[in-house]
Amino acid sequence: MISFTNVCKQYGAQLLFVDASFQLNPGEKVGLVGPNGSGKTTLFRLVVGEEAPDAGDVERPRRLTVGYFRQDAGDARGRTVLAETVAGAGETAALGVELATLEARMAEPDEDLDAVVARYGEVQARYQELGGYELGARAEAILTGLGFGPRQIEGDVGQLSGGWRMRVALARILLARPEVLLLDEPTNYLDLESILWLEAFLRAYPGTVLMTCHDRDVMNRVVSKVVEIDGGQVRTYSGDYDFYEQARALETARREAEYERQQAMLAKEMRFVDRFRAQAAKAAQVQSRMKMLDKIERVEPPRRLVEKRFEFRRAPRSGDDVIKLAGVTKRYGDHVVHEGLDLVVRRGERWAVMGENGAGKSTLLRMMAGVLPPDAGDAVLGASVVAGYYAQHQMELLDGERTVFGELEAHAPTTGVGTLRNLAGAFGFHGDDVEKPVRVLSGGEQARLVLAKILFDAPNLLLLDEPTNHLDLVTKRAVVRALADYEGTIVFVSHDRAFLRALATGVLELGSPTGPRLYGGTYDEYVGATGREAPGMRELG
């Protein structure tokens, strides 16, 4: 359906694609992977025709419909969320607008009524054929699946935060039902309930899906083929993400062995040449071997994914009771978020806080961190507790004009240059990266910088609100490894099931009509006990 044949693409000195070939077939669900800057976004643009290859061909049927969700929500305003979503339904939405216009014209005394009625019949037939009369209901079902409540659906899209506008943009694409869906990190701004709904939607979607995603579970459950871009090469693996990782590791090991064998052979032949180069009796053999060496096609050393490693400074030991909540109540206007909440978090525990949007997860962490006072009751840290609090808004507090190193230096002004450079390196900022202005950093880079500052302080209590948002799979794995070795206490909110699975020793579920529920044990044990992966799972409409 869409084929890349010997595609080459270059930006300046950077080669993104060198003779790249692969194919997208009807109905396939494909994951697109590769390091940052490898060319994933460029590949999307080549598919939709926003860019052209320098060489080779990108072939697609002329009448093919393609929907492209990217990390840019735009600035729509003046329409309801529902109207903005419906407006993205392409031909169907345009026909709906024309029907309304024709209906208004029928009431005009000067109109040619026969011509208007005839056109109305044509438009209505096509609108009905495309399912236009079900469009509003389908839009509401998609918006509900993505976490919108009834009041939000009827509210002005311009009043939404950037993350919620991204959800509207995603809903528009899903409602349009293109033959090919291109999804660039569709789960970045979704809660777990919405991610689970999106998984089910994509599995049932009849069209082709090509997606990048930093959520391992989504990739494993949705895709059946993985396309990898790395070092200008494009490789295809048939299977889910776990299969891709295993196949890539085997292929890397094979290529490393092949490279080592050739290097050993070349070294042996060069020793012979060097040893007998000056001996006339061996001149013919030396010349023969030199010609052979010149003709050998060299095996390139395989590119390895660089595994990041984050290390915590050893935190001082806290008392046994780390956090005590007694009768905690919090309201926003008439909305009661928490009422009479009692909870004790003990040293070494790792509580995952779960609940639907509005259940008060972030509010709870903010009260624990002392940045938001409860309306009633007490939220008290225990003896010798040093808290480190991570939340998404902290990225907005970074100084955009400072460099990465300058931001770390401002946080720890009495710390030596070498120590701060080591800290930056531990969080993936190597060499000249430390001189980057904060304003040019990606969301993932900003998240790493904030984490570096928090972990430098060696807290013995970590309060983490969606710490893996915007982090790629390699960085997530490094964060999980570091937290697994961490000796302090953790209370966290996350929509990433791999993160939940790796760290939680208990689950606090908020939002139940009967009040908060505590589940001792791992996330998998929570799923087994409740029969669901999240408190507010939503069915496909």
Image: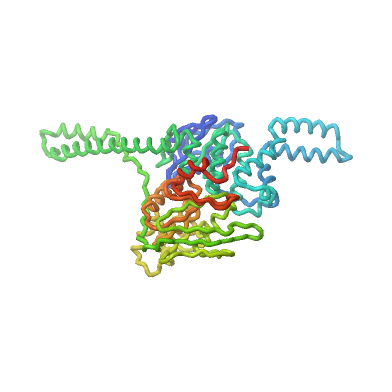
Count of marks, rendered view: 0
To which quarter of the image does residue 229 belong? top left
Quadrant where the C terminus is found in the figure: top right
Asked whether the viewer can see residue 442, the reply is no
The location of residue 249, given as percent across then percent down, is 35, 38
The location of residue 86, given as percent across then percent down, is 68, 42
The location of residue 42, given as percent across then percent down, is 50, 43
Q: Nearer the viewer, residue 383 or 166?
A: 383
Q: Nearer the viewer, residue 334 or 34?
A: 334
Q: How is the image coloured?
A: rainbow
Residue at the image position 43 percent from the left and 58 percent from the top = 346
Asked whether the viewer can see residue 136, the reply is yes
The vertical placement of 143 against 123, above or below, is below
Quadrant where the N terminus is found in the figure: top right
Q: Nearer the viewer, residue 541 or 212?
A: 541
Q: Is residue 284 left or right of residue 483?
A: left
Residue at the image position 46 percent from the left and 42 percent from the top = 216
The location of residue 150, given as percent across then percent down, is 67, 47
Q: Is residue 541 left or right of residue 28?
A: right
The vertical placement of 274 against 507, above or below, is above
Residue at the image position 34 percent from the left and 38 percent from the top = 252
Residue at the image position 44 percent from the left and 47 percent from the top = 521
- Residue placed furthest toward the right: 109
